Image: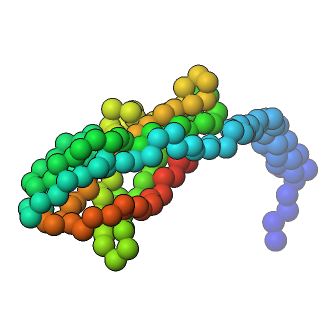
Amino acid sequence: MKHLSALHILAMGAAALVAASDAMALSATATASVVTPLTLAQTTALNFGTLAVSGTAGTVTAYGATTGGVTELGGATPALFTATGSPNTNFTIDIDPTSTLTSGANSMTATLSLNASSIVTTGQTATNASGQQTFNVVGSLAVAANQPTGTYNGTYNVTAHY
C-alpha cells in the first residue's frame, strides 16, 4: 500500500485550488422582440374583365392582354392587397397557384402569381417605415372555345407571414 506524504497531499490540494480558481462566472443576456401581427386587406379584386369568346380557345390576363379567340372588352385589373405589420420587417407572401372560376356547371381555371414589380423578390418583401406594403396578384385565365356565357366567380388564398 502506498502512503502519501503530507507534502504530497498539500501539493494535490493546491493544484485543486488553482484549477478551481481558473473558473469564471459570466452573466449572459437574452432578448426577444415582439412584432405587430400581420394583417391583410384586399383593396381591389382580381378581375379578368368582360370577355367576348369565339370558337377558338384562348387566354386573358389581369392586364387585359389576350391570346387565341378571346377579346377583353374592359374591366381587367390585377388584385391589390395591403399588408400591415411592424415597420421595416421582412415577410413572405404565399398565394394559391390556381383558382377555379365557376358559373353554374361551367368553369374556367386561372393561373395566379405575385406581380414581381410589387415585391422585392418572389414572395419575399418588407413593410415600409409605416409598417405597410402593397402588392398585386395577377394571373392568366384559360377560356375554352365557345365558353358559355355567365358571370364566373372563384376564390383563392393569400397568406402573409413573418
Tally of marks = 0
161 relative position to 9: left or right: left
Give the residue at the far top of this rendering: 129
- The residue nearer to you, when weighing 107 against 138, is 107
Which quadrant is the N terminus positioned in? bottom right
1 relative position to 161: left or right: right
Colouring style: rainbow
- The residue nearer to you, when weighing 61 against 85, is 61
In the figure, 132 relative to 10: above or below?
above
In the figure, 93 relative to 100: above or below?
above
In the figure, 136 relative to 143: above or below?
above
- The residue nearer to you, when weighing 108 against 120, is 108
In the figure, 68 relative to 26: above or below?
below
Give the residue at the far right of this rendering: 6
Q: Quadrant of residue 149?
A: bottom left
Residue 23 visible to an observer of this rendering: yes
Q: Quadrant of residue 102?
A: bottom left
**Residue at figure coordinates x 32%, y 37% from the top left:** 116
In percent of width and height, residue 105 lies at 34, 77
Residue 113 visible to an observer of this rendering: no
- The residue nearer to you, when weighing 10 against 28, is 28
**Residue at figure coordinates x 57%, y 31% from the top left:** 132
Which quadrant is the C terminus positioned in? top right
49 relative position to 30: left or right: left
**Residue at figure coordinates x 36%, y 48% from the top left:** 47
**Residue at figure coordinates x 62%, y 43% from the top left:** 38
In percent of width and height, residue 137 lies at 39, 45
In percent of width and height, residue 95 lies at 42, 54
